[in-house]
Structures are given as C-alpha cells and as structure tokens.
Image (cartoon, grey):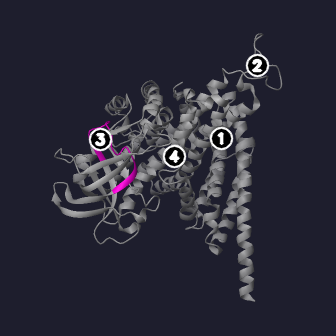
Amino acid sequence: MSYLPVSADNAFLLFDVLKADEQLQRLPAHAATDRALMQQVLEEAGKWVGEVVAPLSREGDEIGCRLKDGKVSTPPGFAQAYQDFWQAGWPALACAEEDGGQGLPWVLEGVLYEWLSAANHGWTMAPGLLHGAYECLKHHGSEALKAQYLGKIASGQWLATMCLTEAHAGSDLGLVRTQAEPMGDTALGASHAVTGTKIFISGGEHDLTDNIVHLVLARLPGAPAGPRGLSLFLVPKLLPEGQRNAVVCERIEEKMGLHGSPTCVMRFDGATGWLIGREGAGLNAMFVMMNAARLHVALQGVGLLDAAWQKARAYALERRQMRAPGAVSASRGPGDAADLLIEHPALRRTLDVQRAWVDGGRVLAYQTGIYLDQARHAEAAKEREQAQQWCSLITPVLKAAWTQQAFDGASACLQVFGGHGYMREWGVEQIVRDARVAMIYEGTNEIQAIDLLVRKLLPDEGQVFGQWLLFLRKSLDASRALDAEVLRRLAELRYFSTLLVQGCKEDETLAWRVADDFLRCVAVLLMGWAWARIAAAPGTEGQRWQGPLQAVTQRVLPEMDWRLQLMKAQWRQTSMVHGVQAAAQSA
C-alpha cells in the first residue's frame, strides 16, 4: 500500500481551522492568493505525489543507491521523477517571481514536502534543501553569484547540499578544519581553493541533475578558532565553463534507513569556490538555510507519522483477531469468528493518539508557515517582528517533538500489525527506519531543546515566551472543556517558567538538565491549543475528529503534568543546594 495524500484533511485544517487564506490575503504579496487557488495547488500536488513518487518508495529502499567510478546512481525511476518534478515547477512554488518562482505562500510548499516525505522519504531528501539554499544565496550571495546560480536553484534544475559536518566535528561546528585559500579574481568574484572532507552529505553526488551546488563551511587563512572563524563558500560540482570541479564522492554510507538517498563522504581537493556573505559570518548565512530546513524536518515527522498511521489503520480495518470486549461488533458477520483490530480498544487508542499528533502538528506547522510569510511581507514592522518571534520559538519545538513522535508513533503503528509489521512486505518497518534519522540531522533534538531554553527563553528572562503564552491564552475560551484544560496547564507552565529563570541564575547546569522536559511540555501544551482550535471549528463532530480529540485529553495532555513534576524536582534540588550554600556563606 503506497501513501495517498488526503488533501481534504489538509484543506480543512488550513481553511476551516486556521483561516489560512484570510491570514495570507492581508499581506500585499499574497493578496490575490485565494482559497480556490490554494486548493487547486494542493489537489494537483497530492495527485502527483500519490501517483509518481509514492510507488517508488519500496523499490528505492530495497535497491538503494550505488557508487561506481565516482558516480552515484539512484534507484530506478528516481531520476525521471525528479525531472518531472522540477520541470512541472514544484520546487519554485514559494520562490520569488523575479527569481523564476511562483511567489506562492510558503505553507503550500510545506504541505507538498510533508506529503513527499510521507510518500518517499529517500527521494524527498534530494530536493529537501533547495528552498533553504535559495534563501541563503538570495540574502547573502553576491549579485554575480545570484545571477549564475539563484534561478537554477529556485527552479530545482540544479540541486544543492549543505556541507557542514566533518568526522571529528558533528554538532560542534567550531571544530571544522576545512580550509579555503584565496586564488584570485574571476567573473564571479574572488575565488578560493577549498580543501577538506565533509561527511553525512545528503545528495552529495547523484544522477538527478547534471550540476550540484555545494554550500561549504571552511576557514580562511588566519581565521580565529571556533565558530567565528567560519566562512561559507559556494562550490559547484561543475564550474561555469562546464568542466568538473575538484569535488569527489569518496563513498556513500550504509545506513539504517533512507536507502534511496545517497549520504556521501565528500572530498574537496582545492575545489574552486566563492564566498557567500562576509568573511567569518558563515554560520549566520548557513542558519538561514538551517532554520528553513528544520521546519521542513518537522513536517517530515508529521508526514512519516501520517504514512505509518495510514498503513496501520488500513490493516486494522481488514484484519480480524479475537473478540473485542464490550458490545457485539457491528462489523462481525455470521461466519466471522473474530472482530476487526480497529474494534479493540488498545489498538483504536494507538491509532487515535497518532492521528492526534499528525493533525495537531499540521495546525502548528501550517500556522508557523503562515507566520514565515508574515515575517517577510507584513506591512507593519511590529507584525513582522512578532511573526519572527513565533517562528524562532516554535521551530525547535516542532522539529524535536514531531520527529520524536514520528519514530515512536511509527513504532506504535508497527505494533498494530503484530509480527507482520516486522516483515518488509507491509512497509511500516521502512517508515520506522527512515524516521529515526530525523531526530538527529539539522541539529539533534537535544540541541533543539537547549536552543529553546538556553538561547530563546533565558536571555530575556522569558519575556517573549511569556507574551506568546498570553497570546495563546487570549485565543482560548474557558467555557469549552478542552480550552479550560489547556488554560490551566498554560498558567502552570507560565508560573514555573519564572521559577526556572531564577533557578538557572543560581545553577548554570539546571537549564541543561531540564531542557528536554521543558521542550516536551511546550509541545504538549501547543498540541492542546491546536486541538482546541480544531474542536471549535464546525464539522468535527464525527469519529474522524472525536477519537483523536479524546486521545488528546486522556493521553497527550497528561504527559505535561508529569514532565512538570520532573522539572520541579530538579528545580527544588537546585533551590535546596544553593539555599544551603547561601546560608553557609552568610553565616
């Protein structure tokens, strides 16, 4: 069973719950983007993903990529599907019209990549960094570099990579050793010879496009040690004159999953490259790319979980096992000795919980996508600032929580199949394997938690975070049961956040000890808020929505309570230790 996008579900959340068309049409850049246009794009995208990309997933996993004589061949059908993809204009959905794009809202691209990840995660890794590379080059590249490369990246005619990691430098980019030596002026500006080896490079070499644009972190001569000494360089596979650059794929990694995506070890042997942005500001330029990638990764989590849920639900609707407890089954015929799996409470609960995470994640990710456009295009500076604050706070939460749920939830969906789920033929075990890496790349989930608490909350002592909690509070109605539950927990988190800020002043390790639990608390609270929005929309009376809604109140929201207790125990430990120390010092 291949993944099939259900565009009506996405459209309901976009238009009936979030009023996305109304939010976007207030922006001059999207004044003409109405609901009919957005729905047409979604319907065509869903059809193309289901018919072209999804059927390639299993064979792509089983055959994988091959490296021979420095060239990588992707699985059968991948290259043709990619040619169809970029020639149909899909990569350029949200790129500016002056760069050859269609100028449509980012949220449409978000939905497209959610579906692509669900349908065929390995194939989707190839174009997954395109928009981030486009934004990076657009905002930091020289006019000459943009003239040469921006249009082809925007269209997807040329694919791009992000070359950060080295064998000794994983998340600690300050340890990067790759060097860039000035070589002289060219038509594209001052060129550099880039020398070093990068690992874990998704799509470092392939047969999908003739050229690949590598964005490489490296050090100029005399650059200081650490992150401030890093600069960013554009290093193409093929130079402007058409000859091959000194870029070599040494090997492709043997991985747990994502067999359809070549994860390469790339060697740069004095390869010609050009500086992007200022010297020593490589991370600033790269983070434009990484932040876009992190929201894409969050939507990968949503999509992969939806794919696992689709398979598990379809199986539960046809497989009979034992008698379900309770009333006589409505689906059991006179010749049936057992009931459908869907009628067993434990398995229905499993499916409803995962469905809740999928739909709640969509609401939050889509709203974040809308705020991305507001941050770029809103007329009022205050509105742009507030939208950017939301994106900055919520992106690490979405990336960490929904990629973790993709793996945990896909494993739960595998359980619905029993022993059959462990077998390849059903495809759910592939989703479990493919989903695991999303918790690691684009900044591990632990780094996302530290980013949220240490870099986003503590510097201003929780002022911006508190303002957004107040915003969430104002959007809720205490007369509705779920809203009241969310409001109570919102107040608890807001109060504890003030205690946590003070505790972190006394104990510099406290934030690092509780960061994971804090992020998960925020994620669960946001889930409650998202589902309060869903529950308030007309048309959610049926089992499709009521089952997951019940799962939110009974299974998801209570997690926040015990996570808070874990953090309070750590806070009390800090308070006790430092209180005793203070008393001893004063004595």
Q: Is residue 263 above or below residue 309?
A: below
Upstream in the sequence, badge 3 or badge 2?
A: 3
Which image quadrant for residue 254? top left
Can you give x and y, in whole percent of width and height, for residue 120 in the image? 47, 33
The magenta stretch is: 197-213
The residue singled out by tag 3 in the image is 158
Amino acid carrying mark 3 in the image: Trp
In the rendered view, does 334 fall on the left or right side of 135?
A: right
The residue singled out by tag 1 in the image is 531
The residue singled out by tag 4 in the image is 438
Upstream in the sequence, badge 1 or badge 4?
A: 4
| Mark 1 to mark 4 CA distance (whole Å) | 24 Å
- Front position among marks 4 and 3: 4
Q: Is residue 450 above or below residue 62?
A: below
At x 75%, y 14%, the residue is: 336
The residue singled out by tag 2 in the image is 338
Amino acid carrying mark 2 in the image: Ala
Residue situated furthest front in the rendering:
69
- Front position among marks 4 and 2: 2
SS type, badge 1: helix
Can you give x and y, in whole percent of width and height, for residue 458 in the image? 58, 66
Which image quadrant for residue 182? bottom left
| Mark 3 to mark 1 CA distance (whole Å) | 40 Å
Upstream in the sequence, badge 3 or badge 1?
A: 3
Which image quadrant for residue 324? top right
Instruction: Say how many tags the image has.
Output: 4
Upstream in the sequence, badge 4 or badge 3?
A: 3
Amino acid carrying mark 1 in the image: Trp
200 falls in the magenta region: yes
At x 76%, y 19%, the residue is: 338
**Mark 2 Cα-neighbour bin, 10 Å: few <14, some 14–19, many ≥20:** some
Near-viewer residue (255 or 469): 255
